[in-house]
Image (cartoon, helix red, strand yellow):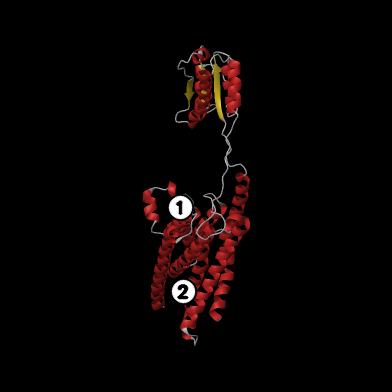
Amino acid sequence: MQVFKLCMKIFKRNLPDMMIYMIIFLLIAVVVSFSNQTVSESIYSDERTDVAFFSSENTPLVKGLKQELAKSVNFVDLPDQTEALQDALYFRKVRCIFRIPKGFTEQFLRGENVKIETTTVPDSYSETYVNQKIDRYFNTARLYLDSQKGITQTELVQHLKSDLAQNAPVTLESHQTTGGGKGFTLSDSSYTSFYIIYLAYVLPAILISGIGTIMVVFNRNRDLKRRSFCSSFPAGKFNRQFLLANGVFSLICWVVLLVPCAILDPKNFFTVNAGYMVLNSFVFLLGTVAFSFLIGNLLKNFNAISAACNIFSLGPCFIGGVFISQQYLNSKVLKIASFTPTYLYVLANNRLTNLTRFDYASLAPSLSCMGVELAFAFAFLALALASGKQVASRD
């Protein structure tokens, strides 16, 4: 096992450089994990909008409206002057200005079509959000006026206050898997889903750094290479030990990166969905190993390894859907990305995340992506072997 031991020594010597990527990735993963746990306790809350509210009358109906809006907006005191109000909108001190004209309540009670004067920041969603609150208030009031003749403003406001205080409870439930699987499906925003997808960045960075270093050492040090091939050590055994060393190194990196995910998010990690995603990451690992062999044969010095790590780990992640979700990427960008294994890896994981059935028909799209990833692995391996022969012939 001389060659195997030699490769392990080289890995050990270059371990600090490779560990930089892993440590940074794991630190970010831990921070994201704790932030997800904090955010999950309160996923949604109303956003309060800064508004200015002016009224030419102080009727019970208007008071009730202002009390209702106070639940979801912040009232900002401003002088009722045109220039001051324009400045407030321009500098975003307020998002909306509402003005109730004189006689509004009386006209509304008579059933006339009246409107509140509204001034908002251009293209602001705040107007729609607050107007929904206002429309709900007056539409409910209109129902009471139509159904209960002679109702007073005070009684009307009391009914509105009671009705609008009701909120419908919303419960999110996980769907139990079918088709022979146990556990529960992953949610779109599960920590495990994000973690496994981000392996598409850290795995190439570590493996290109490690395997590329080994290849450069053997290709650059001609004396070492010639001594190995001139010895009585069989070439086949040499290659087997060489591949075994790189395979062991790659598997160790893969397992070490998966263990934190299992510890930080066991509920989602030990599911059928995550199991197939882990399988997909293993297929991606094979392609990354083959690609690292190819890059290692093409590189001529150690300085180029760092550049290759950044280019071939970051580049496909930006266009393949790791850092930016594929649904937000331009179609032309996705067409270019489709020629990379990273795109297929992310696409398969996105499909696996939402599966609730695990029969062949449901898994076929994801399995086809894995098949193409394997094809990339064989193509990279063939290119690596061909380039290796050229390097050997030059020596």
Q: Please, is residue 286 above or below residue 236 in the view?
A: above
Query: Mark 1, residues whose alpha carbon is within 10 Å: few (<14), some, or many (≥20)?
Result: many
Q: In terms of sequence position, does the residue under pointer 1 or pointer 2 come before the other?
A: 2
Along the horizontal axis of the image, is 307 left or right of 65?
Answer: left
**The C terminus, quarter of image:** bottom left
Q: Residue furthest bottom?
A: 232
Q: Which residue corresponds to mark 1? A: 321
Nearest the viewer among 385 and 97 is 97
Query: Mark 2, residues whose alpha carbon is within 10 Å: few (<14), some, or many (≥20)?
Result: many
Horizontal and vertical percent for residue 43? 58, 42
Horizontal and vertical percent for residue 213? 51, 69
Please tell me whether mark 2 sits on a helix, a strand or a loop.
helix
Which disc, if any, is residue 219? 2
Q: Nearer the viewer, mark 1 or mark 2?
A: 1
Horizontal and vertical percent for residue 353? 50, 54
Nearest the viewer among 170 and 275 is 170
Give the residue drawn at x 60%, y 29%.
165
**Residue at mark 1 to residue at mark 2: CA–CA distance:** 35 Å
Q: Amino acid at mark 1?
A: Gly
Please tell me whether mark 1 sits on a helix, a strand or a loop.
loop
Horizontal and vertical percent for residue 68? 58, 25
- Residue 388 shows up from this direction: yes
- Residue 76 shows up from this direction: no
Q: Amino acid at mark 2?
A: Asn
Along the horizontal axis of the image, is 346 left or right of 262?
Answer: left
**The N terminus, quarter of image:** bottom right
Give the residue drawn at x 41%, y 69%.
378
Q: Please, is residue 162 above or below residue 371 in the view?
A: above
| Contact? badges 1 and 2 (CB < 8 Å) | no
Q: Please, is residue 385 above or below residue 343 in the view?
A: below
